[in-house]
Image (spheres, rainbow, N blue to C red):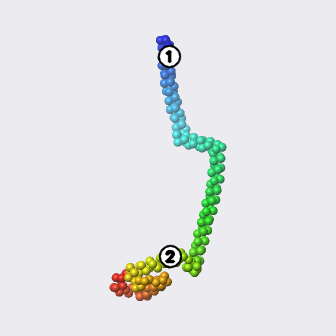
């Protein structure tokens, strides 16, 4: 337990400390204002300070061992990734080149025309052409081979070119 006299001394010391803290805050505030005035006169502002602090922090970080190791590892990984992408790109380009060469030179080859894929495609085209001819009102609803359909189409195109635009009303209605 504290005596009344000790309590009074502590209260007085408390008031004195609070007064000193208030005074120190006022002095600190005045010094901060003075600092701002000097910086303004020197042309220094908050943005410049931030830039300087950032530059210093960036430099400090770059000099750390962890950053150097990470930079080296990522750089090495980037080089390997670049090489891998280059190889993939080269392979794809070569494959497309081979494919275009293969397609150009194999279309005329009988082996391609006899392949199951080509036969399937040819059958689908014949079915589609037959269906269209039937719907449009062609003369041969049974269709015919792919060659016959192409031949008849070419013959019809030649006639329309040779005959100009001489169509009868009946032909125009059929189309």
The numbered mark at residue 53 is: none
Q: Residue 146: horizontal and vertical position, in percent? A: 48, 82
Residue at (61, 43) in percent of width and height: 61
Q: Nearer the viewer, mark 1 or mark 2?
A: 2
Question: Gap in Å between the C-alphas at discs 1 and 2?
Answer: 105 Å
Crowding at dot 2, Cα within 10 Å, few <14 / some 14-19 / many 20+, comes out as few
The answer to whether the residue labelled 1 contacts the one labelled 2, judged by CB atoms less than 8 Å apart, is no
Of marks 1 and 2, which one's residue comes earlier in the chain?
1
Compared to residue 161, the image places residue 26 above or below, namely above
Q: Residue at x 62, y 57 (%)?
A: 81
Residue 54, quarter of the rendered image: top right
Pointer 1 residue? 10
- Name the quadrant of the C terminus: bottom left
On the rendered structure, is 121 left or right of 60? left
The residue nearer to you, when weighing 144 against 76, is: 144
Callout 1 secondary element = helix
Q: Is residue 38 above or below residue 133?
A: above
Specify whether residue 127 is in view. yes
**Residue occupying image coordinates x 50% and y 32%:** 33
Q: Give above or below for 99 relative to 63.
A: below
Visible in this render: residue 157? no
Write down the quadrant of residue 52 in the picture. Answer: top right
| Residue 47, x across and y down, in percent | 52, 42
Q: Residue at point 64% right, 44% down?
A: 66
From the viewer's perspective, tell me whether residue 123 is left or right of residue 79.
Answer: left
Q: Position of residue 80 (x, y in %)?
A: 64, 56
Q: Which mark is residue 121?
A: 2
């Amino acid at each position: 337990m504290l005596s009344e006299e000790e309590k009074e001394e502590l209260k007085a010391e408390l008031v004195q400390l609070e007064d000193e803290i208030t005074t120190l805050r006022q002095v600190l505030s005045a010094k901060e204002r003075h600092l701002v005035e000097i910086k303004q006169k020197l042309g220094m502002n908050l943005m410049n300070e931030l830039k300087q602090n950032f530059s210093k922090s960036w430099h400090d970080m770059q000099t750390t061992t962890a950053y150097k190791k990470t930079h080296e590892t990522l750089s090495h990984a980037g080089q390997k990734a670049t090489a891998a992408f280059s190889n993939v790109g080269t392979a794809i380009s070569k494959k497309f080149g081979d494919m275009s060469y293969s397609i150009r030179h194999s279309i005329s080859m009988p082996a391609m025309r006899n392949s199951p894929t080509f036969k399937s495609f040819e059958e689908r085209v014949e079915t589609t052409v037959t269906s269209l001819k039937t719907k449009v009102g062609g003369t041969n609803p049974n269709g015919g081979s792919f060659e016959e359909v192409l031949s008849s189409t070419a013959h019809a195109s030649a006639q329309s070119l040779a005959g100009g635009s001489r169509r009868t009303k009946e032909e125009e209605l059929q189309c």
